[in-house]
Image: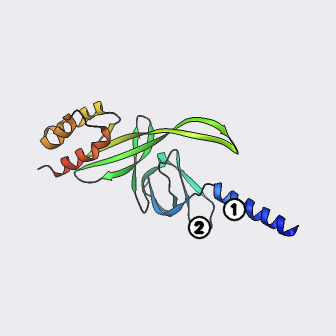
Amino acid sequence: MKKILFVILISAVYTLKLFSQVVSFEKGQIVTKNNDTITALVELTPTYTGVVHYKVNPETKIQSIKIKEINYLKTPYNLFRNIAVKKDDFLFRTVITGKITLFEYSKINSGPSSNAYGGTMRYYNPPTIIYAVKTNENIFIIKQKKDLIQISSLLDKCSEAKALVDDKTFKLENLKSVIDKLNNCN
């Protein structure tokens, strides 16, 4: 009887561990808008919304800081910059640095949910990608192809980049190629 209970207990613990979500923290730095630097273990996530969770060290309680209070966030893998879109602040991931810097923000879109054995299954729609293009101190938000008009003066200076955008098959996901061309144009 004890063996059966032991097997059931081990199975239950293993099942819980198997289906639990693991939150990963890595060394990082948060630079606030007041230029204070918080060096901590920062939660790694595909996108940050509302707050960033962090721990001062592995044993401490999880703390959070609002995105609107952050200037930069550096993780081992990415550098994020706070960029306001209308009245909301978002942490945009740095994609390309140079004369022209490209940032992107991935907004995860919830889809429908359905009941399933053991709980509710949540589905997700494709993410919405918002780009930000920074030149000198100007930042242009690019949500759709027609927004590229904002950087038309840059495109006019580089025929190779303009040709990419003018191509009928151009998709906004290819903006990285355009910024690469703009950064390498003479």
| Crowd around label 2: few <14 · some 14–19 · many ≥20 (10 Å) | few
Residue holding disc 1: 14
In the displayed structure, 103 sits above or below 29; it is above
Give the image location of residue 43, x and y in percent.
53, 57
The residue at 69%/58% (across/down) is 15
| Location of residue 152 (image quadrant) | top left
- Comparing 168 with 186, the one in front is 168
- Comparing 150 with 56, the one in front is 150
Which residue is most to the bottom?
3
Q: Amino acid at mark 2?
A: Pro
- Comparing 11 with 130, the one in front is 11
Residue 58 numbered mark, or none: 2
Number of the front mark, 1 or 2: 1
Q: Does residue 184 appear to the left or right of 76 in the view shown?
A: left
Disc 1 secondary structure class = helix
Query: Which badge, 1 or 2, comes first in the chain's sequence?
Result: 1
Q: Name the quadrant of the N terminus.
A: bottom right
Q: Does residue 23 appear to the left or right of 9 in the view shown?
A: left
Give the image location of residue 179, x and y in percent.
24, 46
Disc 2 secondary structure class = loop
The residue at 22%/32% (across/down) is 168
